[in-house]
Amino acid sequence: MKTTTPIRAAMAAALMLLAQAAAAHEGHGGGLLDGFLHPLLGADHVVAMVAVGLWGAFLGAPAIWLLPVVFPLVMALGGAMGIAGLPLPGVETGIALSAVVLGAMVAFAARPPLALAAVVVGAFAIFHGHAHGTELPQAAGALAYSLGFVVATGLLHLAGIGLGALVRWPAGRLAVRGSGAAIAVAGVGFLAGVW
Amino acid sequence: MSPSRRLLAGALAATLAGPAAAHGSVAGHDGLVAGLLHPLTEPAQLVALVALGLALGQRGLQQAKPALAALVLAAVGGAVLAALGLGGAGPVPSEPVLAVALLALALLLGLGVALARPLPPAALAAAAVLVALGCVFGSVPEGEGRAVALGLAGSAIGIVWWTVDVAAIVFELRRPWLRTGVRVVGSWAAAASLIVLTFSWVQRA
């Protein structure tokens, strides 16, 4: 049997779609969709995740692909802390601060060493993961929920990376840095409780 | 319709399968087809199979051959043992325990994929055996006789089919960004598994 890569990819996508059935199979009410929507319905999560992708694009290879690999793993550690009930002070402040710092990094086109960038992003991943994790015990279909928010987070990174690809052109670079500035300003708004 | 398009149509049709109503069955399907689809409707089995497929694909066809052979043997052997009644006997852990074991394997395999450090061939073969047995014994349908045998046969085929398909996709990915995409998906599997393992541990404590 010979199948082409796109067809196989479509089949893999079909496999992933089946996870929705899996969510219902656990006998809970929420699951994949709830988890998927969780990061998307929080503006602070959305802008910070997009900023991770934008910054990765600015930093170039290998950061552009390293950060999306590292982030979910560290976020899971934060999620595990939240589930285990380990307190993490200032979670919401940390999330808002992540938008400020990551947005500023993009706005100023900061290029720290890769290890430092990974530490900065990883530190904020703990806060984001903790926030998702503390909501998990109330959430239905734990595995499907987790898969949902991890995948949604990854797709937000991808959105940032896609937008960050504009840095190849001078006008695009300006647009990306402007987006970073907007994210930082939004983060200040989150910190101040404006929205 | 070409075989590949038939396969695609089958996979897409499978996505329309409704939520499974009871253990070992998939709504609207019985016997062989229900068994075939069952690994896809159990989150822990699905994540473990995807993680195993990614790891096999990342390891490369040549070095993955022992693990592929082990996967087939364990899936078939496990189905035979389960059909003979071992599924209800003492030595086989309960389904929640099997699910936790599968998630632990998914975490291990996913981490290896994310870090681009796939397990050595022998360890990969051992992991394939454990994943196959965990999936088979977690898929024993309710009922008896022919229906159980057909369901288990479907599960054995499904376990091998879905894993090999994921591995085959990864085998063919050559571009660096696609290989990195595999690592990203591996990190997703590991992350979700870690969170749910912690969740299970906290619930038991």
Image (cartoon, grey):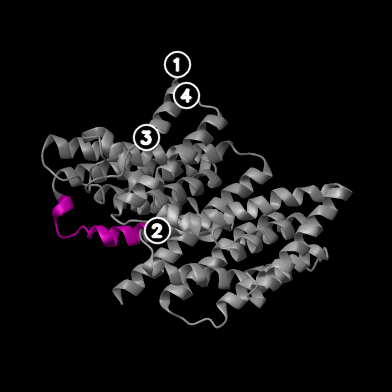
Q: State the residue lying farthest toward the top.
A: B1
Give the CA separation, mark 4 to mark 2.
Answer: 31 Å
Give the CA separation, mark 1 to mark 3.
Answer: 18 Å
Instruction: Name the residue rendered at 59%, 51% in the picture.
Output: A155
Query: Same chain, marks 3 and 4?
Result: yes
Q: Which amino acid does label 4 sit on?
A: Ser
Residue extent of the magenta highlight: B86-109
Query: Same chain, marks 2 and 3?
Result: no
Q: Do the residues labelled 2 and 3 touch (CB within 8 Å)?
A: no
Q: Which amino acid does label 3 sit on?
A: Ala
Q: What residue type is labelled 1?
A: Met
Q: Name the residue under label 3.
A: B14
Query: Same chain, marks 1 and 4?
Result: yes
Q: Mark 1 points at which residue?
A: B1
Does the image show residue B119? no
Does the image show residue B114? yes
Q: Is residue B78 left or right of residue B90?
A: right
Disc marking residue A143: 2
- The chain that hosts pointer 1 is B
Magenta portion: prevailing SS class: helix
Q: Mark 4 falls on what kind of element?
A: helix
Q: Mark 2 falls on what kind of element?
A: helix
Disc marking residue B4: 4
